[in-house]
Image (cartoon, helix red, strand yellow):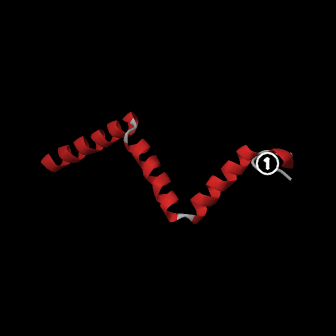
Amino acid sequence: MRFFGCRDPIILMSSGWGGVRHALHLLQTEPAVKRWVISIVWNAIMNNPSVQKFQESLLSATWWHSEQ
């Protein structure tokens, strides 16, 4: 059986994987943690230069159509 691409149960029981399992558990069970992660991801997306350029292009297209 493979879990996270790993067949060795000893590796999955290591402290590193324990931290990952705990983090995933918190993400699934704690609404505050879920909101915090969503907030971080949303901010990263909205501060991405490509996303900002896309938003600007949408705004300019909307403005141009409203002037017609």
Which residue occupies the foreground of this view, 18 or 67?
18
List the residue tagged with mark 1: 12
- Number of numbered markers: 1
Which residue occupies the foreground of this view, 2 or 64?
2
Task: Locate residue 6: give its quadrant.
Answer: top right
Crowd tier of the residue under label 1, counting other residues whose Cα lies within 10 Å: few below 14, some 14–19, many 20 or above = some
Task: Locate residue 11: give its quadrant.
Answer: top right
- Identify the residue at the far top of this view: 49
Q: Is residue 1 left or right of residue 4?
A: right
**Residue located 25% across and 44% down the image:** 59
Which residue occupies the foreground of this view, 36 or 48?
36
Q: Is residue 64 left or right of residue 13?
A: left
Asked if residue 7 shows in the view, the reply is no
Label 1: state its secondary structure: helix
Please tell me whether residue 47 is drawn above or below residue 18 in the rendered image: above
**Residue located 40% across and 46% down the image:** 43
**Residue located 74% across and 46% down the image:** 15
Q: Is residue 27 left or right of residue 18?
A: left
Asked if residue 17 shows in the view, the reply is yes
Please tell me whether residue 48 is drawn above or below residue 40 in the rendered image: above
Percent coordinates x, y for residue 42 in the rendering: 42, 49
Percent coordinates x, y for residue 52 in the rendering: 34, 39
- Identify the residue at the far left of this view: 67
Percent coordinates x, y for residue 3 in the rendering: 78, 51
**Residue located 46% across and 54% down the image:** 36
Q: Is residue 5 left or right of residue 1?
A: left
Which residue occupies the foreground of this view, 50 or 25?
25
| Three-letter amino acid code of the residue under disc 1 | Leu
Percent coordinates x, y for residue 2 in the rendering: 82, 50
